[in-house]
Image (tube, helix red, strand yellow):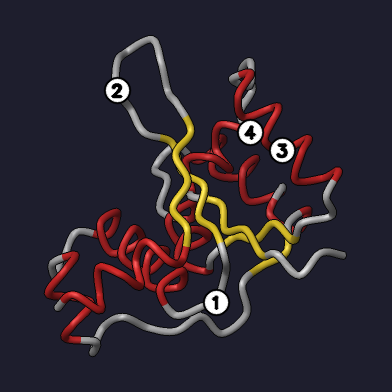
Amino acid sequence: MSDIRVLLDTNIFISREAEQVIPEDLQQLLKTLGTLNVQVLLHPSSIEDLKRDKETARRRVQLSKLDAYAHLASPPSCDTDIAFLAVVGKTTRPNDKVDNDLLYAISRNAADLLVQLQVVSPNRLPLGCIVRQTWQNKLDMH
């Protein structure tokens, strides 16, 4: 197994596990990560996010697939990191809190890379990657 740890955004998990065609760029990325034996992880906040799905049948199906993934054990909490919150902003919205938790895990070396979907048009959901160094540089500037 590689020493590289990749954290999947909740929407990547949903896109991969939903009953729909997986975007080609996501297929290629997941294939490459598998070939390189990279450790692919889900953050506990993403799991909680999935548990909040109001559609019971979809929630049940998604939650049944969680054990196929490694989970990030004991991730750091951003709740009291004033410097980090100054960069990303404090939020009370659950989805924004999940995003902050994922970014914080990257900034504190709990994982090396965050893979997420960026919505840029109704027809295109490109992949975006955030590497640890990018967030560390932003925190160092504050």
Task: Quadrant for residue 111, please give it.
Answer: bottom right
Q: Which residue is the site of mark 4?
A: 16
Q: Amino acid at mark 2?
A: Val
Residue 113 percent location from the top left of the image: 54, 58
Q: Residues within 10 Å of mark 3 (few under 14, many from 20)?
A: some
Q: Residues within 10 Å of mark 1 (few under 14, many from 20)?
A: many
> Left or right: 99 with respect to 63?
left
**Callout 4, which amino acid?**
Arg
Numbered disc in front, either 1 or 4: 1
| N-term mark: 4 or 3 | 4
Q: Earlier in the sequence, mark 2 or mark 1?
A: 1
The residue type indicated by label 1 comes to Ala
Estimate the x, y position of residue 51 in percent, counting from the top left: 48, 55
State if disc 1 and disc 3 touch (CB < 8 Å): no
Residue at image mark 2: 120
* Distance between mark 1 and mark 4 Cα atoms: 23 Å
- Locate the N terminus by quadrant: bottom right
Name the element at disc 1.
loop
Of mark 3 and mark 1, the one earlier in the sequence is: 3
User: Label 2 to label 1, Cα distance in Å?
Assistant: 28 Å
Residue highlighted by disc 1: 110
> What distance separates the C-alpha of mark 3 from that of mark 1?
20 Å
Amino acid residing under circle 3: Leu
Location of residue 25 by image quarter: top right
Instruction: Answer whether labels 1 and 4 touch (C-beta < 8 Å).
Output: no
Secondary structure under the numbered disc 4 in the rendered image = helix
Tell me the SS state at disc 3: helix
**Mark 4 vs 2: CB contact within 8 A:** no
